[in-house]
Image (cartoon, coloured by chain):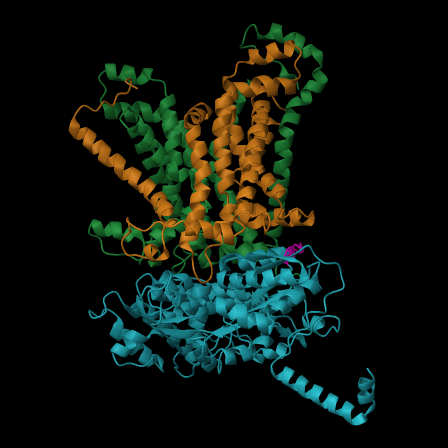
Chain colours: A orange, B green, C cyan
Amino acid sequence: MTKRNFTLNSIGKWTVFYIGLICAVFFFVFPIFWIVTTSLKHRVDVYTEKPVLLFSVTWQNYQRIFELHDFGRYLLNSFIVATSVTLIIVYFGALAAYALTRWRIKGYNWVSLAIISARMFPPIALLPSFFLFASRIGIVDTRRVLIFAHATYGLPFIVFMLAGFFRQIPRDLDDAALIDGCSYFQLFNWIILPSVAPGLAATAILSFIWSWNEFLFALVLTRASSKTLPVVISEFIGFVQVDWQGLTAMATILLLPSIIITFAAQKYLVRGLTAGAVKG
Amino acid sequence: MRQRLPTISRPGFLSKRERVIKRSIRSERLIPYWMLAPLLVGLAILVYSPMIGTFALSFLRYFWNKPQQPIRWAGLNNYIDIFSESLFWQAFGNTIVFMIVSTGLSVLIGLGLAVMFDRKFPGKNVFMTLILLPMMTAPVAAALTWKFLFDGQWGAVNYFVNLIGIPNQAWLASPKLALPAIMVADIWLYAPFVFLVMFASLQALPQEPMEAARIDGGSRWQIFTRITLPLLVPNFLLIIVIRLMDTFRVFDFIYIMTNGGPGGKTETIGFLSYERTFRHFNMGQGSVIAIFILVVVLLISWYFIRILQKGLLEQVR
Amino acid sequence: MRNWKNLIQRPLVILGIVFSLSILNCIAVVSAAEPDFSKVPKGPKPKKLTVVLYEPVEQKAAIEVSKLFEQKFGIKVEVNAIPWINLHEKIIADLTARTGTYDVIFIPGLWALEFIEADFIEPLNKYWNNPNLPKFDIEAYPQSVVNLLSKNGNIYWIPHHGTTQILFYRKDLLQAEGLRPPETYDELFKIAAKFTNNPKYPGVYGFGTTAKQGEFASSTWSTWLWSWGGDYFDENWNPIFNDATGVASLEAYAEAVNKFAPPDAPNWANEEAGAAFQQGRLAMLQMWPYLGAAMEDPTQSKVVGKVGYAPLPKKVLRFPRLGSWGGTVSKFSRYKEWAYLWVAFYNSEENTDNILVPSGVAVCRLLTAEKLKDKILWQDAVNKSFEHTKERPGIPEITPIIDVWGLAVSKVVTGQSDAKSALDEAATKIRKILDDAGYYSK
């Protein structure tokens, strides 16, 4: 990092730097801090004019959401959906990116336009018709339909992110494998995929976070047994009272997996975005 | 399909390749299509056929909550109704303001942070980790949290503005402050991702041009604006277009924080389209707004789409 | 055995028995006969029934009742509570798609004709008149509420929840000033003025109500419009809410919110308004009685025991908005008879008294309301309000119309428009909605 042209040499500059940094960090962290602390508060400590820093900690809120809301099942739903979506997106996204970058495809313009523009379509425009279709074939309120919707809608972005990685793999790798008698799918599964692992890790993280937090598809496509956590959270805005402690307890639980995964693989995230970045 | 042949620009490639090609040109031709098929079939079901459906619906008079009424042809009536509605244009204006300010600020903040992090300092990893936290928050949870933080009575925002001498504000209830408050929430949620992308691109920049400029005696600011920034532009473009698209159809925050109020000051196109479709079940009008969103988003991103297409094509040539 | 036969052979004894039975019967009718739950549907037993309803109070009650239901009939019941903002969308989308996910649906009286005309729900009289199913005595409920979901002699719901908006006030504050709860809106303004910005009562505002754009603004303004003597439509569905009376009522409403309510009131839904009162920031609140339970709950309220409940004041009339919820059976349920059984069971007198009332449901079952008058602090105020009360017309187009009203009220409250022009604009829009739906072509 010594290569950088910005070298800070005086204490004054460092002070300014840290003040700026701490302000930024405060802005980004405070709401999270609020979520976590509120989930541990009694109701009296929530409705106060000043943020209360010292309060008696209670685990009641967590206990309550587990009791009242069939929480275990919703957690499992969210987990199954997000994991399946991640696997699907990563595999099929890589497959499509590979196909697009390795071959000259007839009607390339149309195919690529079809894929890129899919990300531009507002989900709200797709949902009514898709909902009717899904309910006619009887798959509304199943995890399958949500997995399908999330994976399909999330794929285009990932395809273009991954395309950058495939550019970097030399073609000779393919050819060597083909000469050794690999089929194209063997080649893809066993040689190409491992060589873009950092990119896959980055896309996996983004896909997981996306599906885990997604609201609109889940709101429309699930009813009862396949609800995911974001939908359950939104249901805390009751007609009579918002249960802030229960809501924040659930939001905290919702945050945990994303945080763990991101921290475990943070370096891949940065590297993944770097290589996948679009070059004009 | 002869395009399958490798390019001439890479000598030594052909000879190796020839044997491979001989194997089974016929079946091999179809391989990329098989690889693309799952994605394309999925998109056809989830995106393209519903899109055609939406387009057709925009010409019909059709209410989901009135199955007793026959579906009737409405011609351009839905379009006329929507485009002559003052609420629609108010929502459009709000959306444009929201889109520009929110995108602009999140890009500036993201860039500023990326530049700050582009050096060594103690605690770098911890700070980075903390700043990325909002990225992992569910939009629904974020909207609810900010709704509480902006609450005129119990919200912490008032506490903090009091510290710098500003009296209590009724943020979400004020016609002037409601939209800016929602922008703050939006920026909070998405600026970290912008930061991450920019930081990653900054790391990936080649160092030689900057070194050369420094040796030539360029000031730090000159180097940044004349060399670093132009090199970053392609990546900027990606993230800016994504932000523009997403802010243009903002929905979650409005839905949870203000319901379009006070007095329509936070109505946006995305929210209006949701309201017409899923609250009033006026499928015709809802579809008109959805198509309007689509057209605007395509206009915004057209240039970007061309670049992406070209970028992929270069690879094959 | 011999004796029995002898007894029966004597005509007089038989007559006596018949007579005493009929007296018993009469008593039973007076106290509303409990449905006979030994009669169960003949059809196949469902593994699970799904109930969809709208908020925590009802959810709590429904879960409790469902536990008893499962014990008694061996059927698991899933209770789905959905917040107001997406309840309508979820139910309608589901019914449009005919998925039959929901067996029992709780709807407000406001959606009456939308559901009936679309043929989304079953007439329930078909079930309680079926001799093989438990009879349910719908006369145990006020006719006015039952009628909201009746058409052509069919009754489509059992409206367990029927109530009016009332005035919550702080007994302690009003007493300290030697005041009684207001009888008229002029008094309300005077009392509210006394408590707003009064250094004796720091942090207290005089009056609060819900003014958030959408349903909440429209809902509370209804009470004011009708109390001023105005109405929404004339008999030919011409909008008349923008006449002088309507304008005056909205001006008064906006004045009350702007002068006496905290500055964030224009974004208040029930939750925020209720929380403000709970935390002792309001002297008076126009609110639904089912928030009463939350006011008297020491784990969340700072005003326990200090709250008085009065009917809302008069202008020309006392005319608060009626709020109602009831259970219906989905047309697309696969187990309609069992769904009916659940609705009947939920509303049995025993469950109403032992579960619904304690959990805070604003029950309108006549005898319960009478019997528990002293236990339910706000029941007296509600009973007095029932003299004049109604709901906005439950036509299929009501949801978009409410959004128009809600926007107009919100504009006036936040000073973006004057009452006259906002209501005129709303009237034009609503006329267009009704015209498109064919209301003026007959």
Residue C34 drawn at (x, y percent): 64, 75
Residue B93 drawn at (x, y percent): 40, 51
Specify whether C62 is left or right of B163: right
Work out whether residue C147 or residue C114 is closer to the camera in this orientation and state it.
Answer: C147
Find the residue positioned furthest to the front: C2
Bounds of the magenta span? Answer: C95-102
Find the residue positioned furthest to the bottom: C12
Total labels drawn? 0
Residue C92 drawn at (x, y percent): 60, 58
Work out whether residue A35 or residue B298 is closer to the camera in this orientation and state it.
Answer: A35
Observer able to see residue B77: no
Q: Quadrant of the N terminus of chain C?
A: bottom right
Specify whether C66 is left or right of B292: right
* Residue at the image point whose x is 68% and y is 84% from the top: C25
Residue C316 drawn at (x, y percent): 41, 84
Prevailing secondary structure class for the magenta stretch in the rendered image: loop
Q: On screen, C423 above or below B62?
A: below
Q: On screen, B68 above or below A165?
A: below
Q: Quadrant of the C terminus of chain C?
A: bottom right
* Residue at the image point whose x is 54% and y is 9% from the top: B10
Which picture quadrant has residue A94?
top right
Q: Is B46 inside the magenta-drawn segment?
A: no
Observer able to see residue A44: yes
* Residue at the image point whose x is 28% and y is 68% from the top: C205
Q: On screen, B315 above or below C117?
A: above
Which picture quadrant has residue C293?
bottom left
Work out whether residue C297 or residue C183 is closer to the camera in this orientation and state it.
Answer: C297
